[in-house]
Image (spheres, rainbow, N blue to C red):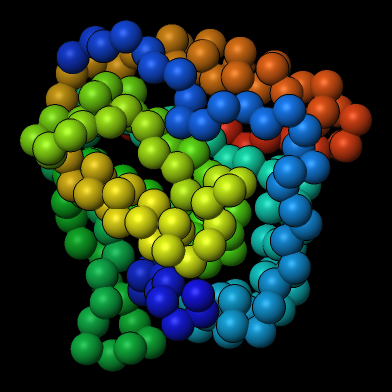
Amino acid sequence: MDNDIRLPPSAYVMPVAPPAATAPDNTETFQKLTLNEGQRRQLSQQGFTNGLASALAKSCTDMPIRIFIIDNSGSMNTSDGNMLVPTANPNEVKSMTCTRWKELQSTIDYHIQLAALLKAPTEFRFLNFPSGVSNPKQEFSVAMPGRQDEESILADVQEGKRLMRSSPTGVTPLSEHIYSVRNYIESMSASLKSSGKRVALILATD
């Protein structure tokens, strides 16, 4: 696994679909994250100190699932975004103007690969069905319980990147998705409370 997942150098109204995975009956399904040498090495290459890497592992243990709501509405085509790109100097990057969607593609790509590297269960759901890709899906996930072997994680990464190559279109039905995710979290609230764990909800929107 350590040799296959590499982090990058630097994240129309449709019926709201259910989350990508069924809520587990018990959050103890999610194991404590203990970083191995390979994971620490790759995080170090990204600029993580040992302390920051350990804090990252602890946060993944305390919040055993992360849910990203991805804004792929038409306004994401606006060209006032910025993204960091590598230069000839491996120790330097530069900022480049791009669309909001291009900036978000870069961000989500990072988090897809970070979830894969850490085997940290993470769900991603679009506000609208992706446009411009075959077999569009409104949700995808990485490293969920039962899919943490190398082959499954690599397949999850490829599927996530494929869907993120779609084009943004439509409006911003954010509240519907928040209500849906709230119901999803409530379905496992007893287990979360009993184990002292939380859920990270990230709204990736303009």
Q: Residue furthest left?
A: 132
The correct choice, above or below, for 61 with respect to 130 in the image is: below
The correct choice, above or below, for 96 with respect to 11 in the image is: below
Which residue is located at x 55 percent, y 20 percent? Answer: 181
**Depth order, front residue of 154/96:** 154
Which residue is located at x 73 percent, y 61 percent? Answer: 33
Question: Quadrant where the C terminus lies?
Answer: top left
Q: Would residue 5 appear left or right of 51 to someone viewing this image?
A: left
Which residue is located at x 51 percent, y 14 percent? Answer: 180
In the image, residue 6 lies at what x, y percent? 41, 74
In this rendering, does residue 16 appear at all?
Answer: yes
The correct choice, above or below, for 109 with respect to 132 in the image is: below
In the image, residue 129 lies at what x, y percent? 24, 24
In the image, residue 1 lies at what x, y percent? 50, 75
**Depth order, front residue of 82/113:** 113
Residue 65, picture quadrant: top right
**Depth order, front residue of 148/56:** 148
Q: Residue furthest bottom?
A: 89
Which residue is located at x 48 percent, y 25 percent? Answer: 19
The correct choice, above or below, for 171 with respect to 204 in the image is: above
In this rendering, does residue 77 appear at all?
Answer: no
Q: Would residue 27 appear left or right of 14 to someone viewing this image?
A: right
Q: Would residue 26 appear left or right of 155 to someone viewing this image?
A: right
**Depth order, front residue of 37/179:** 37
In the image, residue 125 lies at what x, y percent? 40, 31
* Badge count: 0
